[in-house]
Image: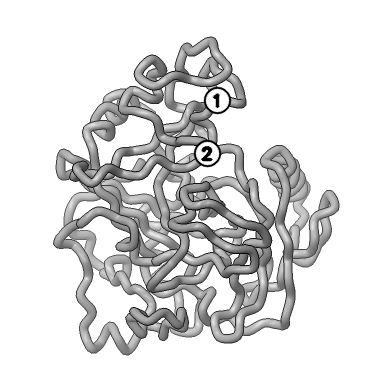
Amino acid sequence: MTGTRVWRKHFHSGWSQEWGPATSKGGEEEEEEDAELTLSHSHHEQRRWAGAAKTAREAGAEMSCRHRVLGYPPRPQLAEGLFKYSPDNVPGADGDIDPTEITFPGCSCLTSSCVVHVCSCLCRGENYNSLCLRPTGKEEEYARPVFECNALCQCGESCQNRVVQRGLQFRLEVFKTEKKGWGLRTLEFIAKGRFVCEYAGEVLGFNEARRRIQAQTSKDSNYIIVVREHLHSGQVMETFVDPTYIGNIGRFLNHSCEPNLFMVPVRVDSMVPKLALFAATDISPGEELSYDYSGRFHNLPVTSREHKSSEEDNGLRKPCYCGSPTCASFLPWDSSLFSTSDTGSRSSP
C-alpha cells in the first residue's frame, strides 16, 4: 500500500472514532434450537483451524458450522446457512482490500519487549499496561490510535505491545438467549481493560458493502459493521466488516445500551484495523458480553454526522431487548448504506 508511512504519521496526530452497524444486527432476531459452544484456545490453535478451513476451501469442500475439525466443537447451525469460522479478517469477495497484507515497517528493537519512546511503534506512549488497554486521558480531544508491533518487528513474541494479535485468552461460550437469539458470555472473570475478542469477517469495500445491504430484506439478519474513524485533519476513514458467512465469535455479540465491552480499531500489519473489543468494566463469570452497536459508549464526542431517526426509519428498525434502565427501545440505526447516491468523500484503509 503506497503512502503507508505518511498515513501513519497523520493518524498519530489524533482522531476520534464513530462506528455502528448499517442497520440492526441479526443476533437479536435469530430463532434456532438451543445450543451451546465453548471457545477457549490459543491463537496458534485458531490459526490451525483457519488453515484447515482454507485447505478445505481450496479442495472445493464446504465447511459447515456443524462439522468437527481438529477437535473443535460443532458450530451452531445458523438461519443463514453455512458459517465458516476464521479468527482473523479475510479479504471480501470484491477483493478491494486485503487485510492479510503486511505494509507496515517493523521496529528494530532487539529486546524481548519494546520500550516506550524508543520503539517506533510506541512513539506516542504505551498502548497497554499489564495487558490492559491504556485509557484515553480526559485532557485528550482525540482517542490515540493503537499500533501494535507487527510481523516485521524485531522484538519477541512476548513483547508488551502484542495483545490483540494473540487472539482469545478467555473461555467464552455461545449460548441461546431468551429473546435475542444467539449470545456470547464469558466462563471466567475478565478484568477491566483486557482484550476479549475481535469482530472479524470479510473486509469489504464501500460498493460491495452497500450492495449487500441493499440486497437484504426485512427478514434477513445483518452483521455488517461500519467503522468510521475521524482523523485530526478532518478526513474520515471507513472500514466495513461482514462476518455473515466467514467470521469469528464476535458475530454472536449482542447490543446493549449499557454494555460491558467497547470497540477500538487496532492496527498490526497494515492500515486495515482489527476491530478489537475490550472490557469496559470487570466482568463476572457467566455474564453475557455486549457492546454498543452505535459506538457512542466509551467514545469521545463525535460529529454532526450522527443519524437522527425519522418515523419512516423507526418502521424499519428492530426492537432492543437489552433490558438496561437506559434502553433506547430500538437497536442503533445507520441508513447511510441504503442511499443510492454516493455523497461526500470517503477513504478506506
Residue at left offset 20%, top offset 75%: 308
Q: CA distance from mark 2 to mark 1?
A: 10 Å
Residue 111's image quarter? top right
Q: Is residue 91 left or right of residue 116?
A: right
Residue position marked by numbered label 1 in the rendering:
159
Neighbourhood count class around disc 2 (C-alpha, 10 Å): few under 14, some 14–19, many 20 upward: some
Neighbourhood count class around disc 1 (C-alpha, 10 Å): few under 14, some 14–19, many 20 upward: some
**Which numbered marker is on residue 34?**
none
Q: Is residue 194 left or right of residue 80?
A: left
**Which numbered marker is on residue 131?**
2
Residue at left offset 61%, top offset 66%: 185
Please name which of the two marks, 2 or 1, marks the residue nearer to the observer: 2
User: Which of the two labelled residues, at mark 2 and mark 1, occupies the earlier sequence position?
Assistant: 2
The residue closer to the viewer here, 255 or 138, is: 138
**Secondary structure at numbered mark 1:** loop
Tell me which amino acid carries mark 1.
Cys
Image quarter (top left, top right, bottom left or bottom right) of the C terminus: top left
Residue at left offset 45%, top offset 75%: 216
Rendered position, 330 above or below 335: below
Residue 56 position, x and y percent, is 77, 49
**Secondary structure at numbered mark 2:** loop
Tell me which amino acid carries mark 2.
Leu
Res 94 seen here: no
